[in-house]
Amino acid sequence: MNKIPKDVSLRGLALRVGGILKDAGIDAVLSGGAVVSIYTRNRYQSFDLDFFTYTPLKELQAVLSPLGFRREGRLFHHPDIEYYLDFPAPPLSVGNRPVSEFNELCEKSGYLKLLTPTHCVMDRLAAYFHWNDHQALEQAVMVARAQRIDVEEVRSWSEAEGMSARFRTFRDRLRMTGDKV
């Protein structure tokens, strides 16, 4: 049985769950705030892990139940840990653009497929662009400062989303923090 320690970190849980899903033949990609947490070394702390997969929730339940997770709709809670798993409906996209490029982490503790830093920034900016989520803007800035991103891809995508002015706000916030963009 694959016990999950009570003091597991978000990154540790993501690697453990990602590895177990992969071993079960399930392709899943981590998105959202958990990726921000990983890329910023917990400068931003998320408590939910958003995995995108086409695998039905019943199949996920069969794989995750032996770990102690209990399903509530699309959410999976574990009684001993503070984090929970969420399985939003696919496809995975940033704004109107489907995502097809990912990073992979392979470590002794597990495996994880996740958004690239550039797509993580775009994911956070989509929340800022479309829902006026200023916390998401700050998360995008945190990731862009902590990781190498393709600013030109972010700019081009922002234009395609009709959000050039909001991209300039992001760029200006990044410049205010000392990064040359």
Image: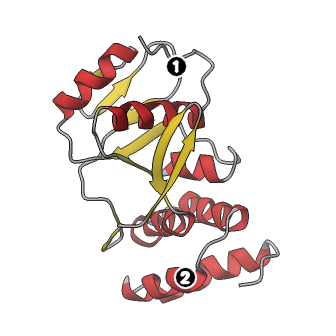
Considering only vertical position in the picture, is 54 above or below 134? Answer: above
For label 2, the residue is 167
Q: Nearer the viewer, residue 152 or 18?
A: 18
Residue shown at the point (77%, 83%) measured from the top left: 180
Q: Residues within 10 Å of mark 2 (few under 14, many from 20)?
A: many
- Specify whether 145 is left or right of 65: right
How does the figure colour the protein chain or chains? Answer: secondary structure
Residue 134 position (above or below residue 75) = below
Place of residue 119 in the rendered image (x, y in percent of width and height, measured from the top left): 48, 67
Amino acid carrying label 2: it is Phe
Q: Nearer the viewer, residue 25 or 177?
A: 25
**Residue 123 located left or right of residue 134:** left
Q: Height in image: 57 above or below 29?
A: above
Q: Which residue is mark 1?
A: 81
Where disc 2 sits, the SS reads helix
Q: Quadrant of residue 9?
A: top right
Q: Nearer the viewer, mark 2 or mark 1?
A: 1
Q: Work out which quarter of the rendered image holds the N terminus and state it.
A: top left
Towards the viewer: 8 or 86: 8
| Residue 114: mark in rendering | none
In depth, the one of 54 and 24 nearer the eye is 24
Give me the C-alpha separation between circle 2 and circle 1: 37 Å
The residue positioned 58% from the left and 32% from the top of the image is 12
Q: Report the amino acid beneath label 1.
A: Ile
Whether tag 2 and tag 1 are in contact, CB under 8 A, the answer is: no
The percent position of residue 174, horizontal first and vertical second, equals 71, 75
**Visible in this render: residue 157?**
yes
Q: Earlier in the sequence, mark 2 or mark 1?
A: 1
Extreme-right residue of the structure: 178
Give the position of the C terminus as an image quadrant.
Answer: bottom right
